[in-house]
Every structure is written in structure tokens, then in C-alpha cells.
Amino acid sequence: TPNAPVYTWDMTVTVGESSTWYKAAQRFAETLSRESGGRMKLRVFTGEQLSAGDPAAGVEQLMNGDKDFSYNSTIIYAGIDPRFGAINAPFLYRDYDEADRALNSGAVEAYEKLSSEFGVKMLGFGESGFRQLTNNVRPVGKPEDLAGIKVRIPGIGMFTDIFRRLGANPTTMNFSEVFTSLQQGTIEGQENPMDVISSAGLAEVQRHLTVWNYVYDPLILGMNQDLFRSLSPEDRDIVEQAAADANAFQIETNRGLEQQQIDEQSKLMTTTVPTDAQIARFRAAVRPLYEAYESVWGPDMVRAVSPER
Amino acid sequence: MHRSTSERVLTVAENVLAAVPFAVVAVVAFVNVFSRYFLNASLAFTSELTVNLAVWMVTMGAVIGLREGAHLGFSALHDKATGLLRQVMTILITAAILVFLAVLLYFGIDMMIGQIDSGRATPSIGVPQWLFTAALPVGAVFGVYRTLQASRAGFHRSTVDSQPSEEADR
Amino acid sequence: MIGGVLFGSFFVLLLLGVPVAFSLGVAACISLVAMGGFGELSIVPNVFTASVASETLLAIPFFILAGVIMEYAGISRRLVDLAHACVGGRKHGLAIVVIVAAFFFSAISGSGPATVAAIGSILIPALIRHGYAARHATSLLASAGSMGIIVPPSVAFIVFAVVVSDYAGVSIVRLFVAGIVPGILLAVALVAASLFLPRTQPVKVAAGGSGGDAGGTGDHGGTADGGDAGTPPSGEALDATASQGFAASFGKAIPGLLVPLIILGGIYGGIVTPTESAVVAAVYALLVGLFVYREISPRQLYRILVTASAQSAVVMLIVGAASVFAYVVTVNQIAEDLSDALLGLTDNTVLIVLLAIVVLLIVGAFIDAVSALYLFVPIIAPVLLEAGVDVTTIGVMMVVNLALGLVTPPVGVNLFVAAGIAKVPLIEVVKGIRPFFAAGLIVLLLVSYVPQLSNWLPDLLGF
Ligand code: NA
Ligand code: NA
């Protein structure tokens, strides 16, 4: 229709142009443009450039309408409201199958509802993947192996508590200083999704990799809710379908890449894949956290993310 | 005199609101290093406190900067101007500073309200975020007063690092 | 279009006399309103706080605090004494003392004006008494102080690392180490230039002269109300201590000389991050001031904190406002357009580098290094990276370039501070700056075209 509105929207991703987040965001932009006949233009910015590099401030922009779209981890949302952190609980899912089953049986709806409370229309989940551990001290296959290791973690209370419970010495630090600090020994280990471990070349300064899937890290593809509601029903369809396509593409690419990265990095670092029995020991070690955090996450979120076993 | 008493109270308030956060930030940061290396237990939660307190330190420090004429700028044309032109320039400079302070005041309060509504608190120790954001409107109010004061004096001291201005000695 | 509004209003405000931080902020606000009405302004407090509340940038107030404490503690004066004992006896010895002392102090201070302020209140009066014209004394101090942002630690390198991270990753530590050789080169070049300074006969000053007055002109002035005066060193003190000899001066300066070891050694040895090294240096200096030199009284802590927070805020307000400015640049993709235009001019690397140097010399004449980095790294860094220049060289080149801006009128912070200390008109300082500016320019060209000068040491040490 000739009178249909024309849009120019901004979207941010936390990481750089080589990431699957960025590629999916680009694909989202292309689909929007194509399906709307060029009416929907989406500009994608990397590295949280619109909020001076601060992802939490970026999520606030999304919530109050200063920004239109973003891919942000639930870990960042948890910095605004800790309920968002429920799905990042330690050793919650063994593998992607288990995560997918939980997502499809209530977790997604729960996150849509929660996001909506903060003015964010959640257009589904992408995925940063499972977070893995690297360190320079010793191979880590059981909780005792972490004793005293200085591990860099994200600046969220739960991560401090996890690594405390596991006997490590957690510390926060800007990611830009992590490589040098690992090299110099200021810190001895760090945890991140495989893509970060691989693209930052951490194997140059790390000896041991533990593929322990200890935290599942989904990405909310968020849109400012007022903006979404201001769209015509047809335009909402276009946005939702393009988002679903982008998320599916992102997750598929990320999982394919992750396996490839684990294979590559295993050649560069001694790699430990804990057995189910060992994972059970890790899980037992962090069990008290679940009790402490249930009130923080709230019963609804805890129920929604619990694995379907 | 009444005015000089209130002036002194104001100055002390500004100094304390800048210096105390600075002291806390420095002490916490040092204790963190110390405990990581000597007690093998880092206080990972401290970084959210230190970076957020920096907002208070910066806004109130900037007010002291306005008070002392310490903000760096290009003052050559303003210094050369005389008479009406100089007055007009002084008014425009004042207006520009006030515009930025007004934006920090109005939209800073806006941001505070949003954070109170969403209940945003720092992720580890749960300090309400708006307490840090409050530095913007509070600093802006102090700043407006100091700007008007400097404007009346014609922005005579405008160099850096609270050095007495070379202009003042000409 | 928005680019025109943004840069246009910025320069109008700047020329009008609005402080740089407010010029940046107001230009950004005007552009935001032009982009989409007053509602767009809600981005301002968001970006401002996000940029200021940064763990990396927290190093800036900490390094400034360390510098202020070191001056109160008497560390800077003892460094000057040591420099005097080393090289003071020769012809032009005192001029060389200035450069050596500035180099020492640069290794513990992260800013240019702080370096000038710390040693200038002792050395400018001394130089004048030894027969140097005021214009030469002040311009020498101002130029030597520009090593403050080249020799690590450096506020400018910290800001460069933060801003350039959108285009290429480089750690602050690597940049710090990369600044050492260029810093030495600049010191040598300044020494060479100072050998040509004209001198009259030294003026004899009666003992116990006007030292008390000079004592008030350090950077302690006026930031805190009440309280007793600090103990900044006077000009005469230097002559008195000069006769102590090398061993005694060295012994007394050891606590000061340990500071760079704590900073760089702490980072290199894997004990602390750059931000942490700054706070450790501050605490160390405080302990020295309180218990070793006993020149800091607990009451002075309040004055130190107020002074340091005001000095830090002057820089950090620029960071906050420049980040809002940078937001407008980013959403409108202004930097990309300017970079493309720059690349469209020529594809000759030598010419592109020369172009960048000229642009930054002009920019550096009008605005400070931190603002310039926020404004021009997004435009220049992608161009130079595209032309094949490595990110370390780009950082060193831009910082040396902007260090020259510290002594280029009309807005040269080091000139202001030196003039303020000596109580001479700014124009006098400017008249004396030419030989030192030429020396700096030679170093700038060297580091810009010889990447090994920046990369050799960090590569050797494995950063
Ligand atoms: Na320095
Ligand atoms: Na300049």
C-alpha cells in the first residue's frame, strides 16, 4: 500500500561483527527490508556502541524506547531485575536437548511475560550457548580442582556465589583486559561461551579447557514494546516472522560453530569433558545456591525454567 | 555575614559529596586488591559499587570545577571582547552551560523515576540504581547556581586544574 | 546534515568560550533535538552515566589522585632534587634537570598539566634565577610536561584503548609499554632543543627570599576551603638541596622512584590490572607521605581528595559529554562518511598518515586530548587501519600528536598551567615554545612512520 509507514530502526548486539549475533541481526535486517518492500530499515550496531559499551545501559535504552531492538543475554537483563537470571542457574541443563525441551514447555512464555513487564516485546530467544571454563592451573573435572583458582567472571552476584561455592577465587574485570591479565597471571582462568573463547584467542594464554555446560546463556531478541504495539497487525507479523527466522538461523549457526570450535580448541588446550557423575558432583556443590536464589528468581520463573526430565 | 555562611555551607556540601565517594571508591578498590592477594578472596561485588559511585564523584567534582573555573575551554575571543559584545558572549556561554545542566536535571530525574519503577538495583549487593543516578539532578542544581555565580563574575577564571588564571594577572 | 549541525554547533560554542565539555554536550543535545525532537534527549543521562561508570576509566581518577598525593607527600620535590644531582652541574644543566625530572614524574603521573604543576612550581623560579628568560623557562616546562601522557601511565592511552575498541582491540598495558621508547625520544629531542636556549647571568637571590609566595602557586590552590596550606616546594629549596650530592638525593628519592616500578611492575608481574595499579600507587604514595616523609597530615587528606576529585571530574565530564557526542556520531554514521571521504582523497599510506597528523595538529590546537580522542579516533583509526598501520602505532602516533596539542595555542593546557605558575602572560609562554614544538614534531614524524619505535618494546616483553 502506498501510504504504509516507513521505518528506520536501530538494533545493537553486545559483541563484534564476526559473531553469530551480528550475522543473525544482519539477516533480520535483510528479511525486514525484503518482506516490507523496503519500508523497514534496520541499522545494526556492534559492541554496545550506543551505550558507551555498557550493555545494561543498552537494555535500559530498549526498555524506555531510546532504542528499538537488541540482542542481549539474560545475564545482562538480570542486572536490571534478577528474575531474568533464573535460566542462567548453574548446571541447570545438561545439553541443548534438555534446554530446548524446557524452552518449549514454558520458559519462553515466562520470559515473554517478564520482558513485557519492563516494556520489552521479546521476539524469541537466540543463544550465546553454554558457558565453558578455561584456566592455567590444572585440568578441572571435579569441584576440588577449582580450589583457589583466580577466575574472571561477569559482574553479577550469582556468578560470584557459584565460584565461591566451588572453592575458586572469583574476580570481575573488563573483558578488554582479560587476555593480558591471563597472560600476566593477574587472573588464572575465565568462563565464557566457546565463541568468545575461540575468537579472543584465549588458547594462546590458557592451558586447560573444561566443557562442562555449566550455565546456559540465551539471548533475548527484544523490541521496544510501545514501538511493537504502534505497528499495524501486518507489520507486526512481518517483524515476528523475520525475528523467528533470525533466531533460528542464529541458534543453528551458533551450535554448528560451537562443535567446530570445541574440536579446534581441544587441539590447543587439554580438554576435560566431565562425566555425568562428575557433573552431578558439581551440581551437588552448588545446590545450596538454588535454595538461596529461589526467592530471588521467584517461584514462577523457577518452575518455568526447570528441566523436563 | 549571612551570605558568606551559606556560601561556606554550600562549598563544604559540594566538597563532601565529591570527596567522600572518591574516598570510598579508592578504599574499596584497594581493599579488593589487598584481599585478592593476601586473603585469596576477591570482593567481586565491589566493582559495581566503585563504578557507580564514580558518577557522584564526577558530577560533584564537575560542580567544584564550575566553582573554581577549572573547566578547560577556548577563552581567547571572550577575553578579547569588550563592552556589549562581551556581555552578549557571557550570556550565551551561561545559556549553553545551563542548557546542558537542564538536560541532565530533567532527563536525569526521568531516568531516576524509570529506575524506581523497574526496581533496578545493582546486581550483586542490591543498592537501588536511582541512588547513583540521583547524582545527575543533584549535581545539575548545584551546577546551575555555580554557573550563574561565574556568569556574574564574567567567567574570569577559565583555565585548568584550578590554576589561577593567567588572565587574572594581566 | 546532522553531522553539520553537530560539528558546526560544537565549534561555534567552543569559539564563543563555552568550556569544551559543555560545548560537546550542548552540540550533541542540539543535534538530538534536530534528529527527533526533545524526547531524544532522554539518551543523554543514560549514555553519560554509562560512560563515566566504567571500570577501565576509573584508572583516570586514581592516577590523578596518585599524582596529587605524590605532590603533597613531597615525592615530586625529591625527584627534582635527584635530577638536579644527576645532571644539574653541567652547562644548561638546569634545563636538562627539567626534562629528566619531568620524565620521572611522567612515569608516575597520567596527565600533562599535572606533570607541569608538580615540578613547575620548583623549577620555573629556579630556571629564571639561573638566567633563563621567563618565556623560555615556562615553555620548557610546558613542553617537558607533555611527556606526561606519553610515558606510562597515561590518561590518553587509557581513553584511546576504550574508544578504539570498536575498531581494533589493544590492551592498555601494551599501549603503556609502547609509550616508553617514544617518551625517551621526546626527552632526548627536548634536551637537544634546550641546548640552544639563550641565557643571561644567573641572578643572585638573598637566602629566605620570596619562597613563601611561590609556595602557593602549585595546583593546591583554592580547591578546598580552610585548612592549612600544603607544603609545595619553593624555588630556593632546590639550590639548598642541590649540594647534597647524588647519593643523598638518590636515597631520599627512592620511595618516589619505586612508584613506576609498582605501577608497571605490578601490571607486568600479573599482580594488578592498570586500574588497580593506580589505586595501589595512590595508597603507596599516601603511606610514604604520612610515615616516611611525614609531609602529609591526616587533615590534608580532605584537601587532597577534593583537589583530586575536581581535577578528575574536569577530565571525566569531558568523557561523559564526549560519549553523548559520540552517540550522535554513531547513530548517524558520521564517522564512516568522514572516513570514506578521507580514504577517497588518496590511497597512499604516507600521505594518509601525514593527513591524519595535520588534522590532529589543528584539532589539538583547539581541544584537549581526551575530547580529541573521542571525536577523532572513530574517524582516523579506521582509515589508518585500512591503510595498514597497526593499532599500537596509531595509538602512539595520536597520543604524541595530541601531546603536542598540550603546548599549542590557543588551547594548550600545559601552557596555561606553566603561565599560571610563573604568573606571566600566556603570550610569553607561546613565544618560547617554537624550538620545543619543532623537537616534538620530529619525534611525532618518527613514531608515525617507524612502527618499530612503538612495537619493539611491547613485542619484546610479549604484550
Ligand atoms: Na605518564
Ligand atoms: Na592545543
Image: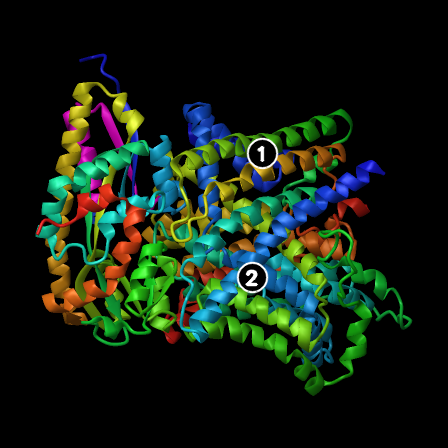
**Residue that label 2 marks:** C63
Q: Nearer the viewer, residue A74 or C363?
A: A74
Compared to residue C253, the image places residue B92 above or below, namely above
Mark sitting on residue C2: none
Q: Which kind of residue does numbered mark 2 sit on? A: Phe
Left or right of A188? Residue C257 is: right
| Residue C412 appears in view | no
Q: CA distance from mark 2 to mark 1?
A: 27 Å
| Quadrant containing the N terminus of chain A in the rendered view | top left
- Magenta stretch bounds: A21-48
Q: Nearer the viewer, residue A257 or C351?
A: A257
Q: Residues within 10 Å of mark 1 (few under 14, many from 20)?
A: many
In the rendered image, the residue lying farthest to the right is C206
| Residue A148 appears in view | yes
**Residue that label 1 marks:** B101
User: What residue is shown at x 81% (from left), y 77% (from top)?
Assistant: C240
Compared to residue C193, the image places residue B130 above or below, namely above
User: What residue is shown at x 74% (from left), y 48% (from top)?
Assistant: B165
Please state the horizontal and vertical placement of residue B23, each as a whole percent of the image: 59, 58
Q: Secondary structure at mark 2?
A: helix
Please state the horizontal and vertical placement of residue C31, each as a whole percent of the image: 47, 29
Dot 2 and dot 1 within a common chain: no
Please state the horizontal and vertical placement of residue A260, each as a whole percent of the image: 11, 59
